[in-house]
Amino acid sequence: MHWHAYQWVDAGAGRGDEAVRRTLPPERVTSVLSPVRAGVRRAGPGSGMAATFGEVWLAVVWLAGAYGKIREELPLPGVLLEERLEAALDLLPRGVDVRWGEWLHDGRFVTIGVACRPNRHVPHPCPMRRPAR
């Protein structure tokens, strides 16, 4: 098992565009918005993929660091980081994606997440693997 880290920051206005964000297979996702379903990810430019990890603890450290970078921009305190990290340590090794979405002071929306491969909920292939020729 391995994990891909993702982060998107958008203006927030396109969050309601469900047709763009929902149910497309990963190879057809073209929007710069984060997909509605956490397992729908792709590799390449604009994918939002920040890193790949072979050890779950490294993915959780990445989550903590990414959240730390935006913490001061959050208008209200939300779920404690310690609780978020505890949940991530439980879910990620079981093939369940972790995704945190937060509104920022200026109306932007940030999504921070880690997708599992293989994934317990979606059958999509790993975006880093290419089909054999």
Image: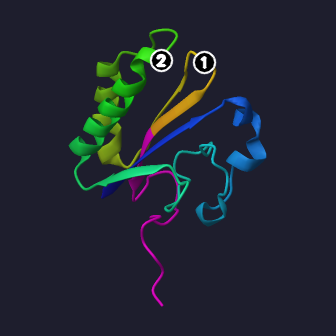
Residue 119 shown left or right of residue 102 in the figure: left
Q: Which residue is drawn at 68% across and 57% down?
A: 24
Q: Which amino acid does label 2 sit on?
A: Glu
In the image, the segment drawn in magenta is 113-133
- Name the secondary structure under disc 1: loop
* Residue 94: % across, % down: 33, 46
* Residue 86: % across, % down: 28, 27
Q: What residue type is labelled 1?
A: Asp
* Residue 47: % across, % down: 53, 54
* Residue 65 visible at all: yes
Q: Relative to residue 37, is residue 123 depicted above or below? A: below
Q: Residue at x 75, y 42 (%)?
A: 18
Q: Residue at x 43, y 55 (%)?
A: 119
Residues at discs 1 and 2 in contact (Cβ within 8 Å): yes
Q: Name the residue under label 1.
A: 106
Q: Which residue is drawn at 35% across and 51% down?
A: 51
Real-space Cα separation, disc 1 to disc 2, in angstroms? 8 Å
* Type of secondary structure dominating the magenta stretch: loop
Residue 126 shown left or right of residue 29 in the figure: left
Q: Mark 2 points at which residue?
A: 73
